[in-house]
Image (spheres, rainbow, N blue to C red):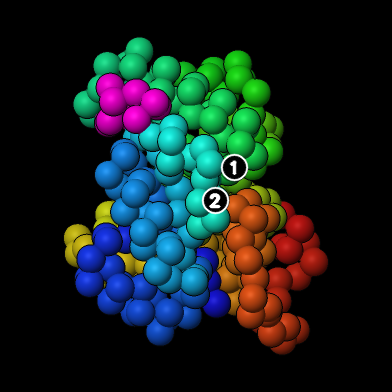
Amino acid sequence: MWTDSHCHIPDDPSGDEIVARAAAAGVTRMVTIGTDRERSIAAITVAGRHPGVSATVGLHPHEATAGSESIADLVDPAPQVVVGVGECGLDFFYEHSPREAQRKAFADQVQMAAERDLTLVIHTRDAWDETFDILGGETLPNRWVLHCFSGGPRELHRCLDLGGYVSFSGIVTFKKADDVKAAAEDCPVDRMLVETDSPYLAPVPFRGKPNEPAWVGLVGAAVAALRGVSPETIAKATWDNATAAFRLSDPQGWTPIPDGGRASAGQAER
């Protein structure tokens, strides 16, 4: 069983089909992510329709000019299916919103997650120093995730030093993603998650096609290969980590992995 810790499932019949295909592939839990008011409402609706799907409410940096007040009523009080705030953060690559608007919306959502004891989901692109500056200057929530990790070991350890989880996407399967692969090798097994960020960033061999939660196992298998462990080991670890990071339910439990499929003690402790 796998958990896709970050995906974007549409609120229409195609979304129901996406969830069904994921479940058939052993992806029995998904967190569908809000990026503005409309998409946050859609995420809540999809999660309310599917027991294995949870939702977040968020304002993506591209939409920062709408202001965090545009989503605040969706978080307070949050429906039972809402497990997080975000994705929020900084994107200085596209800069679809002015940087100051991005900074304010990000800081507001950090505070929102902390006050409501929800998990914070962070997007950062070309803004590592500024992202960590804001995180260092705010009261952080108890649980937060740096999604679609695109840095290397240095950025990884800055995240870990602040108590965050790191979520690896299909980027880890890309040929030239050496920094991300090095981070996936180095990340402690109890702080990693896997995601698709669907419909974006499909993993190899589906790169260039619309991504789906059903393919998150390919991300996990790539991480496992880098670390020299079985995919089952990464599936189990990232399932448990998603349970803790988002306080997800674990109704089905886990069948113990045979000893032959486990990492060595040294590998399991990384």
User: Toward the viewer: 106 or 66?
Assistant: 66
Seen in the image, is 265 located left or right of residue 67?
right
Seen in the image, is 99 located left or right of residue 122?
left
Residue 35 lies within the magenta run: no
Question: What residue is rendered at 63% in x and 51% in y?
Answer: 245
Q: Residue 251's x, y, as percent?
A: 64, 76
Q: Secondary structure at mark 2?
A: strand
Q: Are marks 1 and 2 in contact (CB under 8 Å)?
A: yes
Is residue 15 visible in this depiction of the protein?
Answer: yes
User: Toward the viewer: 252 or 80?
Assistant: 80
Rendered view: 209 above or below 17: above
Question: What residue is rendered at 80% in x and 66% in y?
Answer: 265
Rendered view: 116 above or below 191: above
> What is the distance, in whole Å, between disc 1 and disc 2 at their CAs?
6 Å
Q: Amino acid at mark 1?
A: Leu
Residue behind mark 2:
83
Q: Residue 94's x, y, as percent?
A: 23, 29
Please state, as top left, top right, bottom left or bottom right, where the N terminus lies in the image.
Answer: bottom right
Residue behind mark 1:
118
Range of residues picked out in magenta: 61-70
Please state, as top left, top right, bottom left or bottom right, where the C terminus lies in the image.
Answer: bottom right
- Magenta segment, prevailing SS (helix, strand or loop): helix
Mark 2 neighbour class, 10 Å CA radius: few under 14, some 14 to 19, many 20 or more: many
